[in-house]
Image (cartoon, grey):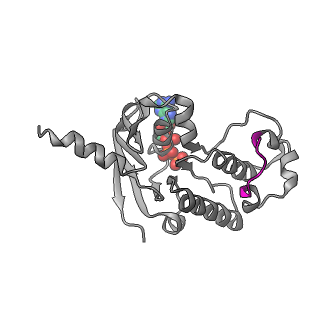
Amino acid sequence: MNASHPKSDDVARTSQRLSVEGLRTPVVGPYSLSLAAGECVVLTGPSGSGKSLLLRAICDLDPSTGMVFLNGRMRDDFPPRDWRRSVGLLPAEPAWWAEVVGEHFPQGSDGVLEALGFGPEVMGWEVMRASSGERQRLALARMLQLRPQVLLLDEPTANLDADNRARVESVVREYLADSLAAALWVTHDPAQASRVGDRELVMRAGQLEEIACI
Ligand SMILES: Nc1ncnc2c1ncn2[C@@H]1O[C@H](COP(=O)(O)OP(=O)(O)OP(=O)(O)O)[C@@H](O)[C@H]1O
């Protein structure tokens, strides 16, 4: 093997916000992909094809083999808590560890809650009184306050009407532009894929296929 290969691999990884190489769990993979700074890549594919499991594996919530790099640094070199703060997962059904919304926002709101359609009174709400669509938007705001460098978004607008869908799309696009974070955005909506995606990856029969976004 040519001795220059490892170095050129390092250069390629460092130039990407996220690099995934041969990532595999007992159920899905191996998958390889990369996300550039500021880029939004949409992930589509049939129900049950493994999109959510790929996001969980990248975030390190499920055991996996293969390699994942953030800005060229290997996932194994990060304390697990730091990895999960830097690579934020917004699951389809987010978990809540405190009863009142404000407890999840110790620094208060930084404007994201307002941009997502909430008034200041939301801080006093009990989480369980929020609708599923409200909880989805609250979970996005909670994740963004940690300033992640990669967003893994699992159908983040699945429960939303058109106005709130537009709010979420706009908040995420602005966040990526401001912070140069990258996003992997799972959607079943072709119109949304072309609105938010810079590229599209389709998961089909255990393969990731790249198609151009229209
Ligand atoms: N722990 C597990 N062991 C075995 N199979 C699993 C496990 N968890 C999920 N699966 C299966 O893996 C497949 C992929 O699930 P996944 O949730 O990733 O699909 P998806 O592409 O996100 O689907 P959807 O678009 O419906 O959300 C499904 O068939 C699911 O039943």
Q: Which residues are magenta?
A: 104-112
**Residue 92, quarter of the rendered image:** top right
Tell me where residue 74 appears, x and y as whole percent: 39, 35
Tell me where residue 72 appears, x and y as whole percent: 37, 42
Quarter that holds the C terminus: bottom left
Residue 200 drawn above or below residue 107 = below
**Residue visible at 65% across and 60% down?**
168
| Residue 206 in sight | no
Tell me where residue 142 appears, x and y as whole percent: 69, 46
Residue situated in front as seen by the camera: 129 or 153: 153
Magenta stretch, main secondary structure, is: loop
**Residue 73, quarter of the rendered image:** top left
**Residue visible at 57% across and 43% down?**
89
Residue 14 among those drawn in magenta: no
Furthest-left residue in this view: 1
Residue situated in front as seen by the camera: 77 or 132: 77
In-image side of 174 versus 107 (left or right): left
Furthest-bottom residue in this view: 214
Residue 150 drawn above or below residue 68 = below
